[in-house]
Amino acid sequence: METGKCDTKIRASAKYIRMSPYKVRRVIGQIRGHSYEQALMILEFMPYRACGPILQLPSPAAANASHNFGLSKTDLFISEIHVNKGTFLKRFQPRAQGRGYPIHKPTCHITIVMKIITR
């Protein structure tokens, strides 16, 4: 069973997060490649609103690793994390002379993939 642990990928995702993917990408670039504990510390002290939804992702991924594969949380690091565009919430803002101005409220999908640290 030890040989299979090196190739194990642990995933967690959050979909339809009500935030622009460009703002989220600014934050995930800071935690890519860090260990589980380092990523949590970085996200807690960054001043961006995008840190909230991202901070909720490493914990379920680590829980998946411990429950499904019997891995320790301290041995995990973030190998991949990416953000994709989601659907737009389409709204209209009333304007002059009876016109309607379209407003697009973006959403995004965040996916995190963690691997075990090989020592």
Image (cartoon, helix red, strand yellow):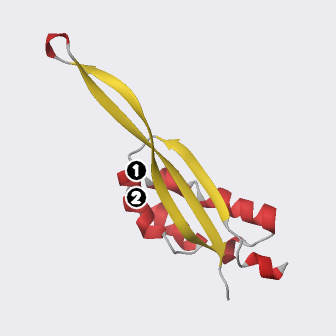
* Image location of residue 115, percent across then percent down: 65, 72
Taking the image as shown, residue 103 lies to the left or right of residue 83, namely left
Cα–Cα span, label 1 and label 2: 6 Å
Which residue is nearer to you in this view: 14 or 63?
A: 14
Residue 8 position (above or below residue 90): below
Please tell me how crowded label 2 is: few (under 14), some (14-19), or many (20+) other residues with Cα within 10 Å. Answer: some
Residue furthest to the left in view is: 97
Residue furthest to the top in view is: 98
Badge 2 element: helix
Classify the position of the N terminus by image quarter. bottom right
Amino acid tagged 1: Pro
Say which quarter of the image contains residue 30: bottom left
* Image location of residue 35, percent across then percent down: 57, 75
Which disc number belongs to residue 25?
2
Classify the position of the C terminus by image quarter. bottom right
* Image location of residue 43, percent across then percent down: 48, 63
Badge 1 element: helix
Residue at x 74% of width, y 73% of height: 72
Amino acid tagged 2: Arg
Please tell me how crowded label 1 is: few (under 14), some (14-19), or many (20+) other residues with Cα within 10 Å. Answer: many
Residue at x 73% of width, y 60% of height: 64
* Image location of residue 50, percent across then percent down: 42, 52
Taking the image as shown, residue 40 lies to the left or right of residue 95, namely right
Q: Which residue is mark 1?
A: 21
Would you say the residues marked 1 and 2 are in contact, meaning their CB atoms lie under 8 Å apart? yes
